[in-house]
Amino acid sequence: MEDGGRWVETALSAFRREYGRDAQWAASAPGRVNLIGEHTDYNGGLALPCAIDRETLVLLAPCNDSRVRASAWDLAESVEFDVGVSRRRGDWSDYVRGIFFALAEKGVQASGFDLGIVSRVPMNSGLSSSAALGVAVAGGVSEGLGLEMGPRDWAHIAHRSESGFVGVGCGLLDHFASALGQEGHALRIDCRSEQVEAISVAGEPFGLLLVHSGVERRLADGTYGVRVDECRRALDAAVRAGLAPPSARTLSDLAGVEMEALEAALEPLLFRRARHVLSENERVEAFCKALAGGDLQGLGSLLAEAQASLAEDYAVSTPEIDWLCAFGPSCEGVLGSRLTGAGLGGFTLHLVLTDSREVAEEQISRGFEARFGRRPQSLWVRPSRGARVEALGDD
């Protein structure tokens, strides 16, 4: 791959040792950070993610039978399964198995593959390591099978794998961001129409600092699914109350409904879930306008509003995240802070003026250590390009 260097060479050597032959394809897909627009994707709303310069690499070689062998070298774990067997194991390999499940649903009779996986996307941290894995496997397998598919198709296959096989009721945000990312841009994604607009962030006077809360998050553990169900119930209640037509598909279809009427029709918990989604869609639009107008103060205020809504209306924050997002803006050059990803742990996002990078990172880290007794992991990331697949040789 173009910028892999020694990392890729090490992986190629590992593949050769593991399987006794050379990899024929190299597929990579990045993680993502969501600037704003959280829990809106499965509600047919708006989001503004960007791919980041941390990626998952999958090396592949097709087999002549139906056996798939996959090794995750970072985890020192290997699995073997038949492409026709759709049975979950409850671990990372489900995100590989699910790709073959999704292809079979499309009528694709896949052969087996040997796969080697290595990743620089932190796991269980809100940066979409699962989407990066799924998109990379989908891209590599589709190319290895000679299918006429592109990055958008890979995103759909990976999304179907995660939602239909792994069992996470997620939307398309993560997979689209990983597959379609553009260097120096965020992507304004309309998750209902699937329209994607590149929003330039190149040359902005701020950088993206991620600070880990120290709490791992796992979407398949249940809370995420509860939120998805609560949103469905809120929509059903709104339809029964006559606030939306029976054809309404998601909470975002309630845009324009008066909040007072919605509050009167829904039980308090469901109203709070709906209020978050509807107000978050508005914040995405406002964030894009603030970017276009160079309104740095407005960007920070919108992040603060989003964090308050995620913590209070959507209840997906944690004490560590609350503290980081409250403390971050008190540090030098920090414009605003909020959780990123589904919440329930993982990284927080901090927009930091470029000239204050080192000072702000140190102040946040030292403050967190004083409060929680441990030094947090922190990463600087930049908006980067999306997934790609390359042929490695003739044999």
Image (cartoon, rainbow, N blue to C red):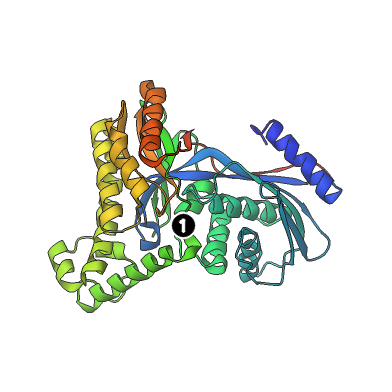
- Residue 5 location, x and y as percent? 69, 31
Q: Which residue is more in the foreground, 264 or 76?
A: 76
Q: Which residue is mark 1?
A: 172
- Which element is circle 1 on? loop
Q: Residue 152: in sight, yes or no?
A: no
Q: Residue 392's spot in the image, x, y percent?
A: 76, 41
Furthest-bottom residue in view?
240
In which quadrant of the rendered view does residue 86 lie?
A: bottom right
Neighbour tally class for label 1: few under 14, some 14-19, many 20 plus, Cα within 10 Å? many
Residue at 21% over, 68% down = 268
Question: How far across and down, in percent of the image, does residue 195 sit?
Answer: 41, 52
Q: Which residue is painted at 56% across and 65% down in the image?
A: 166
Q: Is residue 123 visible?
A: yes
The outermost residue toward the left is 260
In the current view of this chain or complex, which residue is farthest to the right? 20
Q: Amino acid at mark 1?
A: Leu
Q: Is residue 330 above or below residue 120?
A: above
